[in-house]
Amino acid sequence: MASGQESSGTTLMDLITSDPATAASAAPSPAPAAAASTLGKPVTTDRKSKRATLTQIQNDTIAAAKALNPVRAIPQRQKKKPVSYAQLVRSIHELAATSDQKSSQKQLVQHVFPKLAVYNSVDPSVAPSLLMLHQQCEDRNVLRYVYYYLARILSDSGSQGLSPGGGIPTPNWDALADIDAVGGVTRADVIPRIVNQLTADATNADPEFHSRRLAALKALTSTSASSSEILEKLYEIVFGILEKVGDAKQKRRKGLFGKQGGDKESNTRSNLQYAALSALRRLPLDPGNPAFLHRAIQGISFADPVAVRHALAIISDVATRDPYSVAMALEKHIEHGGALHDILHLHDVLARVSLARLCHSLSRARALDERPDITSQFSSLLYQLLLDPSDRVCFEAILCVLGKFDNTERTEERAAGWIRLTREILKLPEAPSVTIKDTDNPTAKVNTVKPSSKAKRPQPLIKLVMRRLESSFRSFSRPVLHAAARVVQEMGKSRAAAYALGLYDVDEGIQLHAYSENAESLDSEFNSGSQSEGTRKTVPVSNGPGGMDTIAGLLASLLEVVRTTVACECVYVRAMVIKALIWMQNPHESLEELQSIIACELSDPAWPSALLNDILLTLHARFKATPDMAVTLLEIARIFATKVPGKIDADVLQLLWKTCLVGAGPEGKHTALEAVTIVLDLPPPHPGSMLGLTSVDRVSASDPKSALALQRLVQAAVWFLGENANYAASEYAWESATPPGTALMMLDADKMVAAASSRNPTLAGALTRLQRCAFSGSWEVRIIAAQALITIAIRSGEPYRLQIYEFLHALSLGGVQSQFSESQISNGEDQGASGTGLGSLISPMLKVLDEMYRAQDDLIRDMRNHDNNKQEWTDEELKKLYETHEKLLNLVSLFCYVPRAKYLPLGPTSAKLIEIYRNRHNISTSTGLNDPAVATGISDLVYGISELVYESKEAEKESDAIDPELAMAWAAGLEDGLWGKNAPAMEKVNEFLAGAGTDAPDVEEEENITSRPSVTYDDLWAKSILETYEAEEDDARSSGTSSPESTGSVETSISSHFGGMSYPSLFSSRPSGYGVSQNSEIRSGNNGRRFSNTSTGGPTLEGIGSPVREEPPSYSSSVLQRFESFENPLAGRGAQSFGSQDEDTGSHNPQFGKALYDFTAGGDDELSLTAGEEVEIDYEVDGWYYVKKKRPGRDGRMAGLVPVLYVSSS
Amino acid sequence: MILAVLFTNTDGNILVERYVPHLLPALDSFDSVNTFPPIPSFHGVPAEERLHWRSFLVKLGADNLKGTKNEELLVASHKSVFVVYTILGDVCIYVVGKDEYDELALAELIFVITSSVKDVCGKPPTERLFLDHYGKICLCLDEIIWKGMLENTDKDRIRRLIRLKAPTDA
């Protein structure tokens, strides 16, 4: 099915030739003709000497064809045998030679050419014969085909003329390739010849030749735009023709819809005008060329409607680049009764569409700010197009009014568009000559117009538009419905933009008008003057009873009609309607209706998954436009998760969760998290249950596949919860206000829970959900839930940690108990079914917590002892304490990321002592030797990954331009105020989505590469998701989430993403050459925030990525430096730490190493080495070690630089 | 830009296939950039893309065109690309476009195509009839769509042009 004729075994040629009548006459006939012609014709056709070469080529080709297909009898009695391409080509060669005979012409027109059309294109070897036909044949039908195929040859972009993919792939193409090689006819040979002959045609002014002239010009424009020579020639021809025919003052006759009767001369002129403009339209735009514009503007007055259409299209294109010149050139035409007004009545839809676009470009052009008279004329014309009888034109006009031109508009333009739509008034010009369409019935055909006095009354645009859309929504045509819904969607976008920018004074409106329904109503006192165009007066809309004539009223009635459209049987229309509704949804409006519509819709199994993901992406786009709507949108997304878990992409959903959580702002975070985790509260799906299809919370996973998908979603949600609960709750152990002592006293579980939930309901809620999942989910879910719990335990302060500890303890005991009770019958493999099955997973978690608590107890005891004895802490004691601290830190880091510089496993009270020890011993807060990533050998992976990182540099560069402010906000992690202050903070959100992510962004990207090298967002996007807005594609490209699958093991959970949190992972402690670390002596006493001060410049990861750092350095510069260091490993210190982390302990502890290879010094400062030699590594610079040897070597030197790779450090 | 025109019979066999040398959006994870060796392009459209689109359209027709009235227009969209399709006699017609060729412009286009096909064949064509007039239909298409743009819309005019006569009597 999919691949058409190939798979079914029947080729199109089979189909065509399967007709007995055709086959009988067609297939055999070429052969005899061929036999005759190949023998005699070369001589007889040699009538004109200039054709000699053509004939020669033709002969060669035929010979080649014969050589390759020696069996001449193939076509002969085999009626069902499909004609091969080679046979057809041969027939052409042969018939061309006898083209003066009627029978040959008939053969060509009836059999050969039509069948050749199956191949879509022909190869250059046919060209000589075609050109011969072109010269000799008089038959119009033959010639039409000749022009057709010549144009095809010209347009073939394949360099060798043969595009093997062209037409129907059959073995014949291979044979042809050989012919091509043997016959030696290449494109390069024939193209100039074709162009010459066609040019001769196109410049032939002979009236007899008129139609051929038009056809030749058309064929010529097929040339690919790459050949400047041919283009030059074409411009010359086109302008030559327009020179002759363009200037004539021609009045387009009224009565445009009938045939144009006219004298021969004017018809010829009109045809030439058409052909020339049509050709001009296909030529590359030449905006700077005044002749180009001049000719195009002349075209507006041409008689041929297609010519006018092309002229307008050209002008409209030029207008986007050079609005001023275009406006000046059009000055006469835009005047009342000018040619542009005539186009309103031109019977060509696309011409009027182009007119709308032209009017839009010119009325919005900055260059014309000085000429409000002109812009207002264009605006007025644009508004008149809103009354156009064609939906296509009317919708284009609406989109133009809304500021949607292509996909590149800025938010401001869209916002201005909404204001324009809601405030502008259409005032029809009072010209008796202009026929006025009935505004009350805009769909009335234009030729039934009757001027009515009512129609002349100024109408607010919004009202016209709403009525028009409502009537369109009653159409039966699906394209009309689809388009109307799309227009409503664009309306929603513009509206959202207006709200987002605060241009739209709706808020004032609400406060000022008690009748909040009318909040959006036009208010002339407010807006006149400021927004309306100079020439029009703004008048109140209230010319009808009730609230119908307020914008809110109009919108409500429109949306009512839109909603009924979901009854359309076409899912694409319904999808567009839902998208429109999502866009028209405002943050403060009730969500229920939309929710129930979507819930209803999703119960329909006809929805393709691509379309559903498309809608999810619409939610995403909607969120970007209005971050306030995060919670609303999450609610909607939830419906997708519950209704069609099998059809939506968990990654898309997670992306939405993540961005919404981030964008929800401080007060919305709780609700956002709730909305995500509501997925967890779902009852397990009931197979086959079809009850309550419309209920939002009902899971409809009736088949195993969707049940599985639902479970994946649940896993994703659990993982998401674990990673982001602390962020959402703004609860971090290293910021906890509660001293540990308090927690330890709250050992009573009930009190603890009460205290916990009163202090932070978000976190408490998340904990409750996770605990339930750890108990009752499927085994996979339980694993992830346990991991999520330990993550929260480690990151949260008391009493949450204790609460989780208690819970995990109970959980493991439960598991153990059940194992005991079933130990006789269980082989231990059905743990998932019997116990919790999590014992092995939980016990190390408990051990970590145990150790932490024990160490905390010890510390408190020691402190009390010291206090009691009024003793100072000795260095030895401090060292011991610090070692414990480091050890615990390493342990903790195995489970989840914590900021090493800030995290205090021994509790807040240890901070001071640790600080003292660090300062005293000049210990960097950075990871250095003790980094568990190094210790566990994870950092070894770095080498393997580095290449990948390097390769993906290009992609990462997208995120180069991170707003430093944003980076700071994210590095600081908790500065919710930023979101609050700048809400909607569109750009920031966009940047966030573009990869300036929640986490220190480049760190996360590396993580992505680390943990899921195969899945980038490009893949994700391309995979199954349909994207409506191309602009979004870029935005979302590099922002990543991880799939829950990656959390399957402890390792991956370490390297996994940290959702909405500003945590880099352990992995990112690798190369990270954040240039800042070079400022080696920067030390800041406050709060333990210190940059690396060791001479080896260990990566100051925390310096950059720590969520609690106060003054992050400029992000962009550091990122930049990082890239530089990747590009040139010798250029910066960044790379140096790359492979040498192990010995990054600072200048105070010089490293020892051994020379791996012999090295001969190449410069004065270099040092020769002998393999096996012991050296002491002093420091590293740009990929070189400065080493000292124990004794002088061959060169008599003791110390110098050696390449890093030549030394293995111990 | 009109991106593609596709004619199939009711079994989904391709009868006419025209792609315009401009990018159709990728239909799925197929990544044309990374393919090696490069897939030969067909009028600028990579072969594999073409196959994806072909199967996408044929499936669309198979799912929706059953029981549809002659010339009733159906619509679909993919990314920023619009598809309008219909059935005429035994022939399914699909057109794909983007930008100014939205659903409604494509509806105009498909109307021009169907009226020309009817004009050439004399009635809504059977598959046989369509194939018998195959060449003429291709010429019609050539007059209707030229370099990705809608050209002639008037069927009389098209009829004149495929006989190499001037669009208006000269």
Image (tube, rainbow, N blue to C red):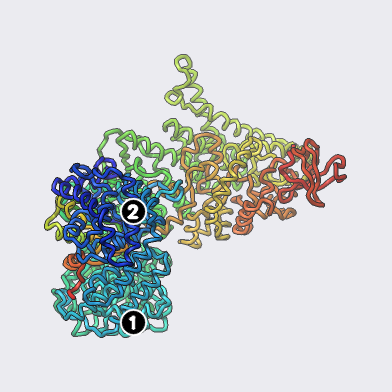
Q: Amino acid at mark 1?
A: Leu
Q: Is residue A459 left or right of residue A893?
A: left
Q: Residues within 10 Å of mark 1 (few under 14, many from 20)?
A: many
Find numbered disc 1 in the image and state the secondary structure of the residue it sits on. loop
Towards the viewer: A578 or A122: A122
Q: Given the image, what chain letter belongs to the residue carrying mark 2?
A: A
Q: Is residue A1140 left or right of residue B168?
A: right
Residue A903: x and y in percent read 63, 44
Q: Position of residue A951 (x, y in %)?
A: 55, 49
Tell me the distance, in whole angstroms, between the alpha carbons under discs 2 and 1. Answer: 55 Å
Residue in view at x 15 percent, y 76 percent:
A449
Tag 1, which chain?
Answer: A
Q: Residues within 10 Å of mark 2 (few under 14, many from 20)?
A: many
Which residue ends up furthest to the left in the rendered image? B122
What type is the residue that disc 2 sits on?
A: Thr
On the image, the x and y values in percent for residue A662 come to 48, 52
- Which residue occupies 25% across, 37% down? A690
Q: Which residue is mark 2?
A: A61
Q: Secondary structure at mark 2?
A: helix
The answer to whether A604 is drawn above or below residue A448 in the figure is: above
- Residue B74 in view here: no
Q: Residue at x 25, y 77 (%)?
A: A206
Which label sits in the foreground, 2 or 1?
A: 2
Quarter of the picture holding the N terminus of chain A: top left
- Give whichever of A550, A215 is nearer the camera: A215
Residue A512 is labelled as none
Outermost residue to the top? A824
Q: Which mark is residue A330?
A: 1
Residue A862 shows in the view: yes
